[in-house]
Amino acid sequence: MGILTTILQTPGMVAGRRLTDLISESSIFAKIVLLILVFFSVISWAIIIYKYFQFKSVVSSTEKFLLQFRRRQSLEKSFSILSHIKASPFAGILGAAFVELESLASNASDTGKVAIDDEGLEHIAEAIDRAGTDEVINLEKYIVFLATTANASPFLGLLGTVWGIMTSFAQIGVRGTATLAVVAPGIAEALIATVAGLAAAIPALIGYNYFTNKLRRIASEIDNFKSELFSAIKKELSEVAEV
């Protein structure tokens, strides 16, 4: 502990120019580890920022979508009004359902009534389910990278730590002494790798848990909307068939 405390308390050893000096003077292997950790960290922060604004837009757009959808006069008018709210996954589901309805309408009888049977309703339900799955997959995009960063970064940092300690012991063996000047560079290299690994992993882990929870809630709302939409379609088709 005495050596580590001395290193951490040495003026300029872990801040400012001396930190960059330690990194520049570290081994090639340590630099590669740090470069990988920096890459993971930068990409993770980019994903966190992107997904935060994406989910924020999804939540606000979905609230607006549902409010207008439940005031609908007909599904056709709802589609023409709500199709522009593309940030909401519900818009994609409604669009897929409307495309399937148009396909059914193209097979209308001479009376202009859409033939409603179990097979047609099954096709509509399948189209809604596929669209809902696609929307969830789209929202899941890039989140797995956060999990990878959270799991891999500490081990990469540990790898750099072990390498730095090995370097210190190697220097002791070469010089035959364990003075601070001999072991400090290797231990400092090890500490930098440890800090870099944790700095990359902690934000990624927090972001992954946050977005996974958000995605779970949105996926549940999508399931509810699929049921609501199918019921609305079934009801409207039944009313048209009775005219």
Image (cartoon, rainbow, N blue to C red):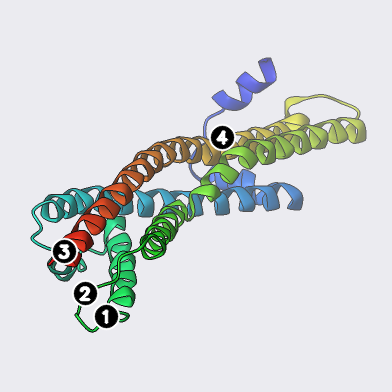
Q: Which residue is mark 2?
A: 113
**Residue 174, how many percent across, how many down?**
91, 36
Q: Secondary structure at mark 4?
A: helix
Say which residue appears at 37% left-offset and 51% top-offset.
51
Circles 3 and 4 in contact, beta carbons < 8 Å? no
Mark 4 crowdedness (10 Å alpha carbons): few <14, some 14-19, many ≥20: many
Say which residue appears at 73% left-offset and 38% top-offset.
159
Give the residue type at disc 1: Ser
**Residue 31, how many percent across, how many down?**
68, 51
Mark 1–mark 2 distance (CA, rounded to whole Å): 6 Å
Q: Secondary structure at mark 2?
A: loop
Circles 3 and 1 in contact, beta carbons < 8 Å? no
Mark 4–mark 2 distance (CA, rounded to whole Å): 64 Å
With 4 as the anchor, is 145 left or right in this view?
left
Q: Which residue is mark 4?
A: 198
Give the residue type at disc 4: Leu
Give the residue type at disc 2: Lys
Mark 4–mark 1 distance (CA, rounded to whole Å): 66 Å
Q: Earlier in the sequence, mark 3 or mark 4?
A: 4
Say which residue appears at 27% left-offset and 77% top-offset.
105
Task: Tell me the quarter of the picture where residue 216 sits.
Answer: top left
Can the viewer see residue 159 in this picture?
yes
Mark 2–mark 3 distance (CA, rounded to whole Å): 9 Å
**Residue 108, how many percent across, how many down?**
27, 79
Q: Which residue is mark 3?
A: 242
- As displayed, is residue 201 above or below residue 121? above
Quadrant assignment for the C terminus = bottom left
Give the residue type at disc 3: Glu
